[in-house]
Amino acid sequence: MWKTIFRRLLLMIPQIIILSILIFIIAEFMPGDPFTGMIDPNVDPAQIDALREQFGLNDPLPVKYVRWVGNALQGDFGRSFNYKTDVLNVIGDRLGNTVRLSLLSTVLTYLIALPLGIFSGRYNDTLFDKGVIIYNFVSFAVPTFVLALLMVFVFGYNLGWFPSRGSIDVQASGFWEESWSRLYHLILPSITTAILGTTSIIQFLRTEIIDAKTSDYVKTARSKGVPIDKVYTRHIFRNASLPIASGFGYTIVNLLTGSIFIERIFNYSGMGNLFIESILSRDYSVIFVLVLFYGILGLIGTLLSDLILMTVDPRIRID
Amino acid sequence: MGFLEVQDLKIHYPIRGGILNTIQDYVRAVDGVSLKIESGKTYGLVGESGSGKTTIGKTIVGLEKATSGKILYEGENVTNKARSRNKKYANYNKDVQMIFQDSTSSMNPKKRIIDVMGEPMKNYFDYTPAEIKRRVAELLDIVGMNAEAMYKYPHEFSGGQRQRIGVARAVASDPKLIIADEPTSALDLSVQAQVLNFMRRIQKEYNLSYLFISHDLGVVQHMSDDIAIMHRGRFVERGPKQEIYQNPQHIYTKRLLSAIPDMDPTKRASQKVERQRVEAEYDAQEAEYYDENGRVYDLQPFDGDHMVALKPDEPNSSLQNETINTGGEA
Amino acid sequence: MAVERNLLEINNLKTGFRFGEEYHNAVDGVSLTLKKNEILAIVGESGCGKSTLATSIMGLHDHKNTKITGEILYKDLNLIDLNEKLYNRIRGNDIGMIFQDPLGSLNPLMTIYKQIAEALVYHSDLNEKQIRARVLELLNQVGIPRPEQIMKSYPHELSGGMRQRVVIAIALANKPPIIIADEPTTALDVTIQAQILDLMIDIQNETGSGIILITHDLGVVAQTADRVAVMYAGQIVEEAPVEELFANPKHPYTRSLLNSIPHELEEGEELHVIHGTVPSLQKLPRKGDRFRPRIPWLPDEAFDEDPELTEVAPNHKVRGNSWKHFYFEGEEN
């Protein structure tokens, strides 16, 4: 196990290097730079060129890359042109918000999905099961932005129960008031995310349970005289949760990436929103770090998923 | 003369491990096997699961890659070329076909039988649609199926019908050799009889050769002219069917034959005694028949075409004098 | 000989599966007895109802889509009347079951020890230590080497033969008087098959249990069974002691089956093929002789309106009278 982790981590180094070079090249081919927006008749083009020269934007690609890597290794990931501060500061502010939102959404997702999946799998073809199937159809078919807008419109605008914008009330002060305000702002976006996230979990659980019910090892268990409830808890649920367990690594990673749609629509100041804003303002130093960050998270997610699967499924031994 | 020759075929799979995932060892799925297939004859390949028998078949049609050794088709080296698009090997591709335990699982479920069977005809013979239709009907008729079956989809057939369609499709390209990998293992006795009968009939009609791969010694005995017994990726014994069944020499062959359940319940006790005697002999003499790494020895001529894998320095005469008595008679 | 009490008695058992609104019987009026110390083989091809018969005895069918009628008498109980709770006392304790696929029938995520122990937990008051001792004893009994080590392994770490020994150990855990084995050696190589069959016979000699052996393999039957029931289309068509059945097969189906076993042929000779195919459950003719469509060359008068299973020789039962008129197609009568 430790050998596998070590080997996989070792393997990640070249992957990350290749990823960073790729992103660097792509970023280089993007039209415009942070100074493009400054072009107007009142600004002397020579001045802009001088700025470009000063920031090293005219250097050859490898030189720029090596410089960036050198700085990054010292913890300097560059400055955001947009926010006029260190990239890490910009990201750090948003990361906390995204983690809070994702954590609550994930908890809600499993809180909704596990009982629905388990009961519809166990009592399939009942009225309850059919209801769950319809719920699943709808939650699968509805696009994120439609559901999000609907939630904003109904609960935020019409009923006015929950705030529909932002991550905290600026007037809130003191720890408890602030915490409550944060939570209050989280409710709509997290429920929306949770509803959309339940689909695949319910679907997987339901079909896996239905498959497991007719499997031979369940027949064996039943012919041992194991009571049916015990057959479910000891045999069926555990085996049926394998695919979900393997997906859990990615779920953890998703905690950190944030949802572009949800954050945008609820104007929630998280990673997803930052990403879009950076793209729109061509804030390359931020985009670059974000993409690299997402890439690394993806690699970690795969590793985590494999490790989880290795621990829950004795058949899988990667060494 | 054999038109297909396999010479010292080896198929090894690397076992990886260690920090850098380097090759630590090899699984020797097939480890130095030679055989010749003659036209119009059936070559039976017998072995237990994991013996490497299926791997040989797959390598001949190009589904596995040979690590070393040669496959010669009419004198031409065709090793690892079976799926080549090179025109040079077109004949080989056409002439060697394979059928599996469930033939229709390899068929596109969205295609009708006529499309599935028509494909090789289009590829190899430039048939017109009318010609394809006539030929498909003809082939279905040979395997005892109604011409209307051509408009159905693979899943609409029962197990026995599917295998017959599998045979018919393999025949569609007018091949010389069909590699049949456990073609009747999933079938009921009465359906198996039907498929085996059709395979024999087609063989006569087209002067086909079969490489018949199976774990079922009864079926292989029924179908084959020559037989090779495989164990641990190598041949332990090879020769004409009668020789192998009536005069087995290698301890593994004897063990295999003695394990076939006899259809006569009155011989139950005697078969059990005999089987346990052979088992004990196998345990006692294992070192005599396998080298220190558990590898089967090279084949040596025993009696004419009958070859046995024996310890090189052991004189054969001592074995010939031993009385051989096994429960493997028909 | 003293009349021995039957371990299990099945009377007119019918197991129907629901298709839409209708029930179609996969087992259609089966009556059987099983005695102590006896191996009763039930032979037939796929779809004949032999596996359904086994699962009916174990009560493993889902009640929503299955209808079971008739009697399965065990110790003055009719099993089909039992509720789940009572049935669970019988399952594993009085009847042990062995399934075909040794890999599939073990839970891939549980150690061998846990899976065997599970069979003991619900039927005994053994403590942890006693359970461990019993599991070891069972593993020894089924001939597993290094039981201490194997106990801690997972199913995928064992060979096919070893797995099937574990499955047998599970079935034996509570020393049940009845064992049902559904194709126990079909997934195994021939040498392993021989070992497993030997093991089953040894166990039966030791424990005196009655075994119902369900199989399609006539060789396995010839080597292990004491008595044989041949099933076709949900019914028993012939029942006889094993020597009698192989020496004197009577029913046309039994004879056809024995004739289609691959063997060495004369030049120009072919294996016997049974005419037509086994009808699907929904299309099964429920009236008259069910094998009639498969032997169309026999004259109409050869068939009964309602063929019954009758004793034609001591302990030898055959369904209907068509066997008296039967000859193979192309042969002279």
Image (spheres, rainbow, N blue to C red):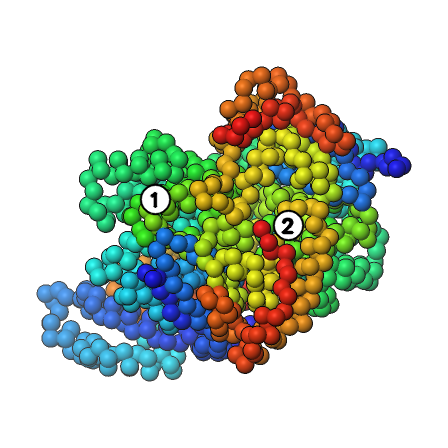
Residue A148 in the image: above or below residue C17: below
The quadrant holding residue B217 is bottom right
- Residue drawn 47% across the image and 41% down it: C269
Q: Is residue A55 left or right of residue B310?
A: left
Residue B205: where, in percent of width, then height?
34, 44
Say which of B152 and C3 sits in front.
C3
Residue C201 in the image: above or below residue C69: below
- Residue drawn 64% across the image and 22% down it: C321
| Residue type (three-letter) at the residue carrying disc 2 | Asp
Q: Is residue A145 visible?
A: no
**Same chain? Circles 2 and 1:** yes
The quadrant holding residue C56 is top right
Q: Which residue is mark 1?
A: B205
The quadrant holding residue A119 is top right
> What's the mark number on residue C191?
none
| Residue type (three-letter) at the residue carrying disc 1 | Glu
Say which of A300 and B247 sits in front.
B247
In the picture, the quarter occupied by the N terminus of chain B is bottom left
| Host chain of mark 2 | B
Q: Are marks 2 and 1 in contact (CB under 8 Å)?
A: no
Q: CA distance from mark 2 to mark 1?
A: 33 Å
Residue B253: where, in percent of width, then height?
57, 63
Q: Is residue B215 left or right of residue C201?
A: left
Q: Which residue is mark 2?
A: B262
Q: Is residue C332 left or right of residue C235?
A: left
Say which of A268 and B118 sits in front.
B118
Residue B240: where, in percent of width, then height?
47, 59
Say which label, 2 or 1, has the lower sequence index: 1
| Host chain of mark 1 | B
- Residue drawn 30% across the image and 45% down it: B172
